[in-house]
Amino acid sequence: MKRYHEKLLHESEKIWSAILKHPFLVKTAEGTIETDTFKTWIQQDFIFVREAIPFIAVLLAKAPLALRSNFIQIMVGLDKELELFRNNAQKHGVDLGNIQPSPTCHAYIQFLMNTAYNGSFEEGFTVLYAAEKVYLDSWMAVKKGMNGSSPWQEFIDNWTSEGFVQYVDWLAMTLDELVQGQSETQLKIYSNIFRQTARYEFLFWDMAAKKEVWPI
């Protein structure tokens, strides 16, 4: 019998396949991605990680007592990721000082915060698991497809590290525990949220690949 997180992944198999085959990831692995394209991702993901900290803070306020210390550590981890972005931005000449979210980044952040504020803790936790699982699988796919080192190696190493693997495994296990005994109606809500998060993750790669900007 599948555990709940495995069921979610099975239900989103087509979306997951599209994510892992996205040209942004394929070209990053091949070493053929345009520098400006990757710089677009750096700018937009920097914004996303920055805004993910308030998302985690809202979940922390709703979290069961036993999970509060974990969420404090998650915020610390995100703050370290911001430093990773700043260091690489300086190294590669990427401006992080005067940037605005693209339409996709803006919409994704709004989805994040709406779920955190208006949804249950379990709903917000489902978003967190989906987003982190996508990043683990995406960067693992990049790592496996590489034939050498990459100018973006620090990003690849960050999301394929043993520590990150263990963190995502913990998210999966904890989600399974959180939803035990809940109704099929509620489980369906989590399933829809998981799938929607995965769709946004696909669109995020697409946004970076197309260097998306506001049309007006």
Image: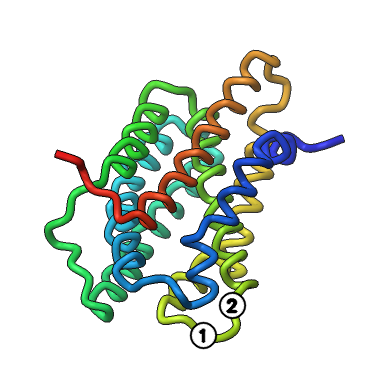
**Which residue occupies 69% across, 15% down?**
183
Residue 77 lies in what quarter of the image? bottom left
The amino acid sitting under disc 2 is Met
Quadrant location of the N terminus?
top right
Q: Which residue is mark 1?
A: 149
Q: Position of residue 198 (x, y in %)?
A: 53, 41
Disc 1/disc 2 C-alpha distance (Å):
7 Å
Mark 1 element type: loop
Q: Which residue is mark 2?
A: 146
**Which residue occupies 56% across, 34% down?**
194
- Whether residue 165 sits left or right of residue 93 in the image: it is right
Mark 2 element type: loop
Residue 137 lies in what quarter of the image? bottom right
Residue 200 lies in what quarter of the image? top left
Q: Residues within 10 Å of mark 1 (few under 14, many from 20)?
A: few
> Closest to the observer: 196 or 72?
196
The amino acid sitting under disc 1 is Ser
- Whether residue 52 sits left or right of residue 130 in the image: it is left
Quadrant location of the C terminus?
top left
Q: Position of residue 53 (x, y in %)?
A: 34, 47
> Closest to the observer: 137 or 58?
137
**Which residue occupies 26% across, 72% down?**
89
**Which residue occupies 36% across, 71% down?**
34
Q: Residues within 10 Å of mark 2 (few under 14, many from 20)?
A: some
Q: Position of residue 18 (x, y in %)?
A: 59, 48
Whether pointer 1 and pointer 2 mark residues with C-beta atoms closer than 8 Å, the reply is yes
Q: Does 63 sit above or below residue 45?
A: above
